Amino acid sequence: MGETTRALKDELKAYARAQGADMISVGSAEAFDAQVPNLQKTSTTAAGMKSLIVFGRHMLTGALTTTDVELQGVNSHMCMDEIDRLSLAICDWLEARGYVGIASPPEAAFLDLDPVKPMGTLDFKWVAEFCGMGQAGLELNLLTPEYGPRQYMGVVMTDLELEPDPKLSRDLCPGLKCGRCAVTCPTQAIPQEAPASARSVRDYRYLNKRQCSLGAQRIGIRALHLNLEDIIFQRAPIDPERLIDCRYMREWWQSNNFKVGSFAACFECWYVCPPGKDFKQLIQVPYRKQDIPVGAAATIRRGDKIAIVHRGPNPERADAYNRDKEFVKAGTVTQDKE
Amino acid sequence: MSATVLDKAWLRARARAHNLHALGVTTVEQLDAALPPPLRPSTLSSTMRSVVVVVRGGYRGLAWARHVPTKHFWAGRILKEVDDALGDLAADLERAGHAALPVLAMALDYAARNPTDLTPLGQGTYLARVAAVLAGLGTLGLNEMLLTPQWGPRCFVGAVLTELELEPDAPLATELCPGLEACGRCAAICPEQAIPLRQPAGASLAEVRHLDCVACARATQPYGPATMARHLTAALDRDSPDERWRLAKDLTTGELWQQVTMHKEGAFTACQECAQVCPVGADYAAIQRSPHRQADLPDGVQHRRGDGWVEVQWVGPQWRWPSPAPEREGLPPLTWMQPQR
């Protein structure tokens, strides 16, 4: 790569940071596509793309100090709105210089790629790891040196050939030698044991997405389906007034209008993850210290495996997740009024 | 309000600051005369004199890409940014002492307008498109989209009404659209055949220009309000719980939920086929470098001539999303989803 291309990359990064990106990295689109086993590759969106530009914007540390999870949810969606804006701003920058810029939609799950498993056109965490912006951790969140898992990402593909950034040379996530995310996960979606012989978290990192969605998308489409199923088949005697005038219905309205609860609605694994320069500040908050009290998370040995003991979130929030049947329960005539 | 002297150069600078790429002016009086009664600006406010029309150019990257839902998503987000920018421009006018009303694409007053107003593509309201023509920013194409010299139809358009009296710009002297007989690419590719496919030989563009808005909405608003109404009606009409459940859990329910919750404005921007193949616009040569665009209409457009008529041979798009468009057989037409122009 020539000096001109290098200068262009520096200029792009400076622009993105000035627009509000906290981090940005670049990789080769062709090399990325070559290692992706499914359709989540650049060529699904467009042929002729040469580079991938991935960037992140951190979730406000202040938003993670609050006890109000709904307020956190609104903040997370504000952060994602900024990702939308930044995506288009980077496209503007590229197109003003004669290149093509195509942003990958950050918050859409497309059914045309696989009608059974809705997915984005790119899996941003793998793009980010490939481009050296961070590393996917035990729970498959992207961890960065700056903010651990506490950021949202955007990706823009372009026909401009940019020099790829180097990959991170070390693991940011210690895996089950730490395991705090697995200890606290309210729906047990994160691995709780792994072979003791594993050399890196990369050998066993995993997320049970269906389980995760019970918390992170608790007022989303799946919960709607499950509730509709019970109502349609009249599996319980329903009082329409109770059904409609319940907390779940109010929160469902909110989730449709403001996305709160529909996705990005559980932050438990973010609260407790030690990587990131922001964690020192976060863990000073008394309320956050209670998430996993000192001594409550430890790695143990089980034969040829290492493991953690699941504890779940702060008991105050025990009822906040897995609300699949709450709507129907609220409407059944056997229930007491709210 | 205390009035500040301002001119179109000031307005253009403000528009550029809000990422709007072109600006023109017409009068409320002229626009009233050009629109059917329900769509006239004077029905929105009786005190406004001028219409400030703005255009935001589209991204060449979106026209380049193949993945239809990606285009659909981002076009919705851009439409939202344009609406936001109209608000910012109106605020600038008010800070300068002149009352201003942004005419927002998403403000669908179902008593007076319906979602067909945003066909095709969600480019902007029909009011804004006609205002743009009067203000000299472009001309209407065969498909009733605004075509501009810079971006052809690959742009979004919006309008701000203001009580400030501004000198109107002059319309362009000639049509930008070559029409059905000389081109017809938009008609040949339209998935719903919503754009005229035949015309009397020699007829002028003004005589032929038309869009079957309801048909267009099936492709460009596949999970919009009309589909929601049809889908719910179909589910409620079913007698058996099994049938109701089948409809409740099918992909249409999931997509409708996703449109309402996440795509928002994108519910009106799903199909961009006609815009992608339009040869008008300085950006077209760059877009044609895309292998996906080169594969559109691979044999060009075939015209059949005879008996005083010219007919374009329909080809259709390479990809269709969703495929097929969600339809609910046997349901009567929606009375509120009717053409208004």
Image (cartoon, helix red, strand yellow):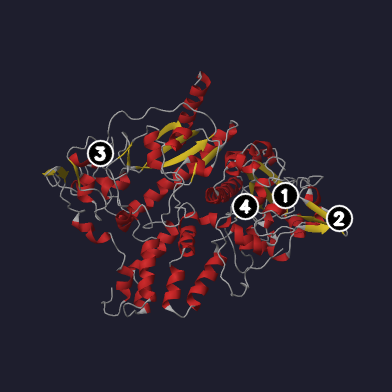
Query: Residue A68 is drawn in which quadrant?
Result: bottom left
Q: Which residue is mark 3?
A: A201
Q: Say left or right for B58 vs A266.
A: right
Tags 1 and 3 on a common chain = no
Q: Say left or right for B130 vs B307.
A: left
Residue at position x 71%, y 53% from top? B188
Q: Is residue B259 visible?
A: yes
Q: What label does residue A326 carry, if any?
A: none
Q: Which residue is mark 2?
A: B201
Observer-nearest of B6 and B109: B109
Whether label 4 touches label 2, CB < 8 Å: no
Local crowd size for mark 3, using a 10 Å CA cut-off: few (<14), some (14–19), many (≥20): many
Tags 2 and 3 on a common chain = no
Q: Which residue is mark 4?
A: B100
Q: Which residue is mark 1?
A: B185
Local crowd size for mark 4, using a 10 Å CA cut-off: few (<14), some (14–19), many (≥20): many
Residue type, label 1: Arg
| A298 shown above or below B238 | above
Q: Quadrant of the C terminus of chain A?
A: bottom left
Residue type, label 3: Val
Query: Which x, y percent locates residue A200?
Result: 24, 36
SS at circle 1 = helix
- Real-space Cα separation, disc 1 to disc 2, in angstroms: 17 Å
Mark with earlier residue (1, 2): 1
Outermost residue to the top: A3
Mark 1 or mark 4: which is in front?
Answer: 1
| A80 shown above or below B260 | above
Mark 4 or mark 3: which is in front?
Answer: 3
Which chain hosts label 3? A
Observer-nearest of A283 and A233: A233
Tags 1 and 2 on a common chain = yes
